[in-house]
Image (tube, grey):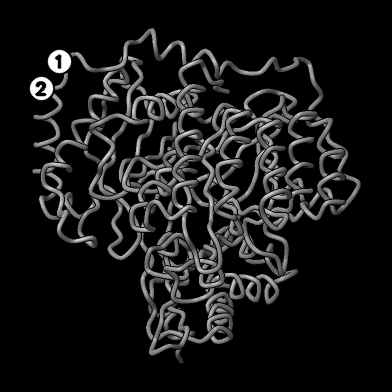
Amino acid sequence: MYRYDQYDQAIVDARVDEFRDQVRRRIAGDITEDQFKPLRLKNGLYLQLHAYMLRVAIPYGTLDSRQMRMLGHIARTYDRGYGHFTTRQNIQYNWIKLEQAPDILADLATVEMHAIQTSGESFRNTSSDQYAGATADEVADPRPWAELIRQATTFHPEFSYFPRKFKIAVTASDEDRAAIRLHDLGLKLVKNEAGELGFEVYIGGGMGRTPFVAPLIRPFLPADHLMSYIEAAVRVWNRWARRDNIHKQRIKILVHDLGQEEFTRQVEAEWQELVKLGIDVPRVEFDRIASYFAPPPFETGLSEEIDRSDPDFAVWLDQNVKPHKAPGYAIVNISLKPIGGIPGDASADQIELMADLGERYSFDELRVTHAQNIVLPHVRKADLYAVWQALDAAGLANANLDLISDIIACPGLDYCSLANARSIPVAQKIAQRFAGRERDLGELKLKISGCINACGHHHAGHIGILGVDRKGTENYQLLLGGSGAEDASLGKITGPGFNEDGVVDAIERVTDRYVSLREPGERFLDTYRRVGFDPFKEAIYG
């Protein structure tokens, strides 16, 4: 994994010193809140309903045990004993005191972490496949490219004052675990017929008020030209973006308004001019970055046998453990979705335990997923039972990966000043309603947002829930048929919304109809796409 060089450390240390002075001036009243707001947002600090919230960057979701322990330390020392892992592979702390925020950033800097690019109108944290470097179905590890993007865009003048935020995801597998087509810019590593490495480029995806699935803008971009192409796309966006209307400033609106063909034409023309200037990152610099992502020293000759005699372990093994590219190893998914718990939350003790397990059993490496879970990417099969026992003792052995209780949910109205409705209680009630029945339903991805900004990715849920405000009352709209995977699609609103208990009942009616209609081997999404919308709407409303 990537390690800071002297430039990285100098940048982060200087940012901490600058922010400490800015906070001092704000507390002293030398600057107003309006003057302070853009400064704090550049450092990932939001003012929410009850307190400040700090969002810490975990670039492409990769971190080591000392970094994970620092996240636990911050939860215990500066928050209320827990952190919330997010859908951009970051972590948020919801109870931060302003005067302590610079100390948190200083602590993060000691373990090569920061809060840059987690807020404001700039490039956000670049996300990637949580199985990168461990799965056999990728053409190459996409994380060096994600790190290249991070380095090339940090404080770049062309990328510092965007019309709105800009989100990038990078993957390298046909199975899209990074939801690239629901990003402003989605990149898929591929090889052409000559065996050369390049990218499929998707631009103009996103959720929120106006959701779009990104169209394919370029089927093959030579890998060496990645940064010039990104700059070309951003220049076109900067040139034409609707800076006069906050609801029309995202690049997805421009792609839609210009049309895929015209937008592509303008990007290609801009890119040809940039190529002439030779602004791409030299190959030697990429090779330097890529050297940090060399595979771990996997042992050879390991046994593939696993003792499945413990039935609870066997269930977890089947649901949460995935194949690894190296014989004798496996990928372990740690669910942060206990029945009745808050999706994505982990206590300081749990965070530190996961750090210990990563250090001992996974070559000192952990991953945060966009589904708000944690991954140990490189675990020997011989160690799986010991890992499971430790997780089970800590309440982290929920065998529900990709099941209906593995819910993605934003913090909602319990914390967020933008939310219209609560997300957490709805997620808890759904998980409790389906407890013990999740595996009977098979893969079913349920996602909840507390407002139209869609931080819970409700548009991409097989079943999605959107909380809205209806004349001062929390109301929940139900959506069906969304997907953030390689078969990306947007969910369709079923009809009138429900109250908190009513939406749980409606979901049960939907799943009952699915069970009555499904054919052998079908997921919920498969059945929905085969039979269509109407049978489910009839089940919901009668």
**186, above or below 27, in the image:** above
Type of amino acid under label 2: Glu
- The label shown at residue 215 is none
The residue at 46%/33% (across/down) is: 15
Task: Tell whether 102 sits left or right of 253.
Answer: right
Which element is circle 1 on? helix
The residue beneath circle 1 is 277
**Closer-to-camera residue (473/196):** 473
Name which quarter of the figure residue 222 lies in. top left
The residue at the far top in this view is 284
Horizontal side of residue 130 vs 117, given as left or right:
right
Residue 152 locus on image (x, y percent): 35, 25
Query: Is there CB contact under 8 Å for labels 1 and 2?
Result: yes
Counting from the top left corner in percent of width and height, residue 72 is at 71, 44
Spot occupied by residue 65 in the image (x, y as percentages of width and height): 71, 32
- Residue 32 occupies which quadrant of the picture? bottom left
Q: CA distance from mark 1 to mark 2?
A: 7 Å
Tell me which residue sits at (64%, 64%) in the image: 405
User: With 201 as the anchor, is 149 left or right in this view?
Assistant: right
Q: Which residue is mark 2?
A: 273
Residue positioned 55% across, 77% down in the render: 507
User: As drawn, is 244 to the left or to the right of 158?
Assistant: left
Q: Amino acid at mark 1?
A: Leu
Callout 2 crowding tier (Cα within 10 Å): few <14, some 14–19, many ≥20 = few
Q: Nearer the viewer, residue 412 or 161?
A: 161
Q: Nearer the viewer, residue 512 or 164?
A: 164
